[in-house]
Amino acid sequence: MTRSAGGTESTLPGTVLCLVDDDVAAEAVHRELAAVGVRVRRVGDVQQLVQESARDRSTALVIDSTHDHGGGLTRVRGVRGDFKLAGLPLVVLTPPELPVSFLAALGDVADDYLPMPWAPGALWTRLAWAALRNAEFSPMAALTGLPGLMRLGQELDRWMESDETFAYCRLDLDRFEAFNQAYGYPLGDELIQTLAATLRRVAADLSPAPFVAHLGGDDFVLLCARDDARPACRDAADMFATDTLQHYADADRERGTFELTDRRGVVSQVPLVTVSVGVATDEYRTYTDRRQVAAVAGEMLAFAKKGATANIAVDRRHS
């Protein structure tokens, strides 16, 4: 749906999930958004947010921060800490007056904020802007619905500062460019969506709750407990290999390769697309910066991709 917002054309989400404790404020949200054709569903907690968002990918969030002593961020951070919600446009309802420190902290987790009470039209305008920014700056989020690099960095910082063990698993598709050349980019996008769906399935069975991010192209990250890393990545690679067989021509599927013709007309046989993973953990290293973690995982991924089939390389170096 498109509406004019601030003199520009902005796209409103089809559904807004409303986690607002005050009945009057919740009714104001519903009244304003319903008037412009947006479905509004009020939920009672973050768990219900997750369940409802899975039903409709065209979703944005409205959450109030007034329940926690006049503006706490606990609830909002909890929402952004769940990878299934982290990529959705989010507008936070706040008290009328806020300290600068609160606004600075809010900027790390919300797309926009709106002091209560608000002027008519202000809520849907801010939601439209947030949805438009997400579509413009996160094209991969539109494809997979997963958060990107910024939210991953924040979650990695949190894991590094906690007492929990962690593994940073960087996943990448082998021979993906060759597949795009042979089968076309629309089917290539389907492979990316399949890997995203696979990671969601794998993550659903892990505890403590992991975080899944899409960095762009065929590049994903699973952030999880250290002991979960290898079995989770193996499950993801195996599921992906099975789920993507349908994307190949019968002859290619039976042969286990597909044909690729280069610019000189030379035909070569390319193995089917698989998943390789590079894993950095805190088992033998102490990291002081998130960039160190990402660099080690990148080194491991380069090592894993040297094989002809799906490989998982876990860093075991002490320095």
Image (tube, grey):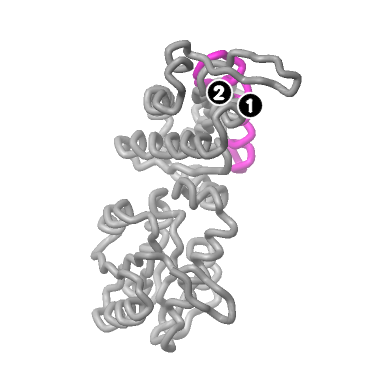
Quarter placement of the C terminus: top right
Res. 297 visible in picture: no
Residue at x 44%, y 28% (from the top left corner): 247
Picture coordinates of residue 255 (x, y %)? 47, 11
Asked whether 293 falls inside the magenta stretch, the response is yes
Observer-nearest residue: 221 or 95?
221
Provide residue 28's location: percent of width, then percent of height.
31, 82
Looking at this view, name the residue that lies furthest to the right. 264
Residue 271 x/y as whole percent: 54, 16
Quarter of the figure with the N terminus: bottom left
Q: CA distance from mark 1 to mark 2?
A: 9 Å
Q: Which residue is mark 2?
A: 315
Residue 20 vs residue 302: left or right?
left
Image: magenta residue range: 287-315
Q: Residues within 10 Å of mark 2 (few under 14, many from 20)?
A: many
Residue drawn at (48%, 77%), measured in percent from left and top? 125
> Pointers 1 and 2 in contact (CB under 8 A)?
yes
Residue 196 appears in the figure: yes
Badge 2 element: loop
Residue 299 has which mark? 1
Q: Vertically, is 318 above or below 57?
A: above
- Residue sitting at the far top: 255
Magenta span contains residue 285: no
